[in-house]
Amino acid sequence: MSTITNPIIPGMAPDPSILRVDNDYYIATSTFHWQPAIQIFHSTDLVNWQLIDYALKDTDLNLQGTNTPAGIWAPHLSYDTESKKFWLAYCHVQNMAGREFNAESYAICSDSITGPWSKPLYLTSIGFDPSLFHDENGKHYIAVLEWETREGYQAPGHIVISEVDLTNGKIKGWHRVTTGFTSRGCVEAPQIYKHNGYYYLLLASGGTGYAHGVELGRAKQIFGPYEANPTHEPIITSSPHHLFSLGDPDAGHFEMYNPNSTIQKSGHGSLVKTSDNKWYIAHLMSRPLAGTKLNPLGRETGLQQMHWTDDGWLEMADGSNFAKQTVQVSNTDVQQDAHIFDIDDHFNNGQYDKRFMTPYHKQDQSWVKVVNGKLSISGRNSFFSQVSPSIMGTRATSLNYYVQTKLEFHPTHYSETAGLGLYYDANNWFYVRLCQANNEKGLVLRALQAKLGQRIDFMFDEVRVPNNTAEIRINYHNGIATVNYRFTDCKWTQLGHQFDLSYLSDEGVNGEPGEIGGFTGLFNFIGAVDAYEHQSHGDFEYYQVKTEILRKD
């Protein structure tokens, strides 16, 4: 028996879709405006998880100009036992303006979880969050949210189901089956399961904020009619008290923040049955900064144990619907590795760590490559760009950590920079960079910040850089950052003062009152900018991220 502490996958790992094939467990998660797209994690014990691949690495995927948090949403993993193929359904949200939510849903398949995956098969543009269900009779079905655009109708819309031909993507006729099984509303992310003669429909509800939850209905026929869970409440949530929110398409629901819970926003779940007939649900969750409702790490992946009641309903193992921070996993005595998501990459063997991702566009050797044991990053657009910023980022996975690098840089123009930073999106980031002094005489180290689209240059804190080389470390502790540097092997020196970066969070970025501004998460990064002639490059010797375990005494 092992006790795990949620999250099992920290940092930006939302909308988890869990799958077991033989003795292997897989989880696919959303990636939004980041590429490569759709993270796939692997575990053999449900306790420790590692990123093994991405599903969408195709150069045809174009996320340039994508607004946060559009892009690639809610992947759904399934396995067809008849064809012995893995299937992955997902949607590409291309527009969120005017609450139109234009999205295209696709499916890809593969003989192996690591690919190669087939070319995307177009399914529908009716809404978002598609999933596939492979029935015992050989038929295949798609479930998705039908996005409602009519005034006066319940938003965000109906959950619809259709049989689908997976050879050509043909939809055989939509059936509207429900607008939800509780009064929380905002249902999405439908997933179909079959158990003891019933079709079970698992839904996310309550919006992407503090009212989030997982709800359940069942029917004897796949198109219904579906009956609601007898409690008429979510089967998992971080905020169990009753909420009536029908017609609200989405909101932060800050009034539903639960001061008695370490984890918040528990919802959007996916079921898995273990080889010893235990049931678990992987679900998204968040961890706010202490004393705030700000979630820098975005939505992470948690795990809860479930069981079936005598009357055929699914509930948490303790009979409640309150998501727990600690969970028992049977049939293993593996310990959870607190440092499994740390990074120490010295770019050996001409490669860089697969956990590096890039916003809005793909990685290729035109701008990033390993040269003579260093990661060479060529500068291009500024980091305000949603087209082609030269950013190599990794998910922040702790609220207490440091990120560190050593780089060499030879700029010839004041608009050429290279350095280390923290990044949420094009309007919100913090960057400690090597650049020319303003008088164009010599190299300096200076911090630059983007906050809600405003550019803030800390030019009074700059220091001269000898020999065009510096080591930079950013220490991040519960939303507050300090910057240290050194130019030789001498001890670290602090640059400037403390920086409050708590706004680099889902709730802190460009949101409307009452709503969250995003639902992606904080990244650490190394990168370069060249608004001169796109010829300069920063050469990075290593990249390190280490979680700092704080003592509780």
Image: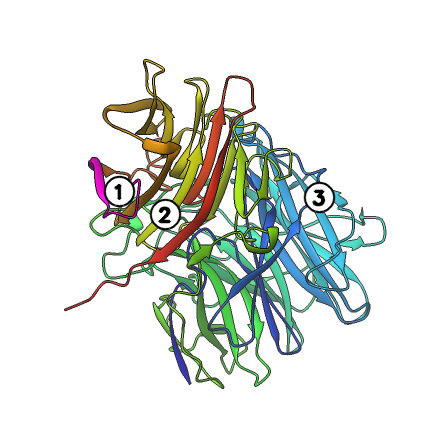
Residue 492 sits inside the magenta stretch: yes
- On the image, the x and y values in percent for residue 103 come to 63, 37
Badge 2 amino acid: Gln
Numbered badge on residue 268: none
User: Which residue sits at x=44%, y=49%?
Assistant: 543
Q: Which of the two residues, 224 or 57, is positioned nearer the viewer here? A: 57
Residue at 28%, 61% in the rendered image: 261
What is the CA distance from the residue labelled 1 to the residue labelled 2?
A: 9 Å
Q: Select label 1 or label 3 by which is in front.
A: 1
Q: Earlier in the sequence, mark 1 or mark 2?
A: 2
Circle 1 packing at 10 Å, graded few (<14), some (14-19), many (20+), is some
Type of the residue with mark 3: Asp
User: Label 2 crowding class (10 Å Cα cut-off): few <14, some 14-19, many 20+?
Assistant: many
481 sits left or right of 504 in the view: left
Q: Say if mark 1 contacts mark 2, CB within 8 Å.
A: no
Residue behind mark 1: 484
Q: Residue at the spot x=40%, y=71% of the render?
A: 337
Q: What residue is pinned by disc 2?
A: 404
Badge 2 marks a residue whose secondary structure is: strand
Q: Amino acid at mark 1?
A: Asn
Residue 376 is inside the magenta segment? no
Q: Which residue is mark 3?
A: 58
The quadrant of the rendering that contains the N terminus is bottom left
Q: Is residue 113 above or below residue 402?
A: below
| Residue 429 in sight in this render | no
User: Can residue 261 be seen at all in this image of the molecule?
Assistant: yes
Give the x, y percent position of residue 139.
80, 63
- The residue range painted magenta reads 485-498
User: Counting residues from the N terminus, which is met first, the one under dot 1 or under dot 3?
Assistant: 3
Q: Are marks 3 and 2 in contact (CB under 8 Å)?
A: no
